[in-house]
Amino acid sequence: MNRCVIIGGAPINDYDRIKKLLREDDFYIACDSGLKHIEALCISPDLIIGDFDSYEKPNTDTETIILPREKDDTDSFFAVKEALKRGFDDFLIIGVIGKRLDHSLGNISLLLYLHKLGKKASIADDYSVMEIISGHAEAEDCYPYFSLLAVDGDASGITVKNAKFPLENAKITAGYQYGISNEAIKGKTAEISIKEGRLLLVKVINE
């Protein structure tokens, strides 16, 4: 199936950069105030979801799911579950990292949720692209920095090659996050392998 792009209401300042990540055949779900980004991104939502506590419900023929304001799932989490019901396996989530740290951390947990289900997913904001990794992953030298963060318990057997700060059979825990601001060697791609656990890989685009 095509990729599902979920659009939240957190600020997006560099629309041109985000637009470069979009594809012609993407399926777009706008979550509540994520609708404010539609015009600048030059897209039309295929589905609108929200409780509309932060944005006026649009008068449109586009399929719309109205949620109660008091619920367990955030609008973005409900959107992910709805997309899964519709058979999507590939996700790009934008507009979900902002001033509210609680919301930002909650949205990062969407990546953990999707990774456990074996789905491909990433979050992009004005500064980075992030994904949950296990096994093997790469960080290209086009990114000035990349970081490895323990967000789901300990990860061990971590090896990083072709990087300024290589690792060999290392361990990263939530209590000691030393895998921040590494750099791929110029002209090479950093190779990352993890024997046990999962890490959040953050590829930094802008400081």
Image: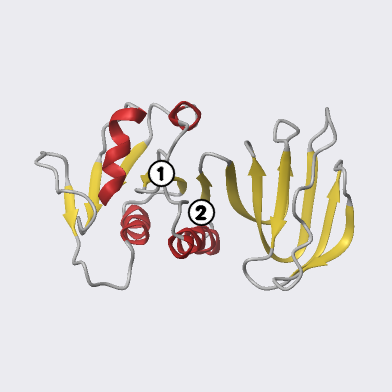
- Tell me the number on the disc at residue 119: 2
Specify which label sits upstream in the sequence, 2 or 1: 1
Amino acid identity at mark 1: Pro
State the quadrant of the N terminus: top left
- Quarter location, residue 149: bottom right
- Where residue 99 sits: x, y (%)? 45, 54
Q: Nearer the viewer, residue 73 or 205?
A: 205
Q: Is residue 58 left or right of residue 180?
A: left
In the image, is residue 39 above or below residue 89?
Answer: above
Q: Secondary structure at mark 2?
A: loop
Circle 1: is it few (<14), some (14-19), or many (20+) Cα within 10 Å? some
- Tell me the number on the disc at residue 11: 1
User: What colour scheme has been applied to the protein in the rendered image?
Assistant: secondary structure
In the image, is residue 21 above or below residue 147?
Answer: above
- Where residue 2 sits: x, y (%)? 40, 38
State the quadrant of the C terminus: top right
**Residue at 83% of width from left, 32% of height from top?**
188
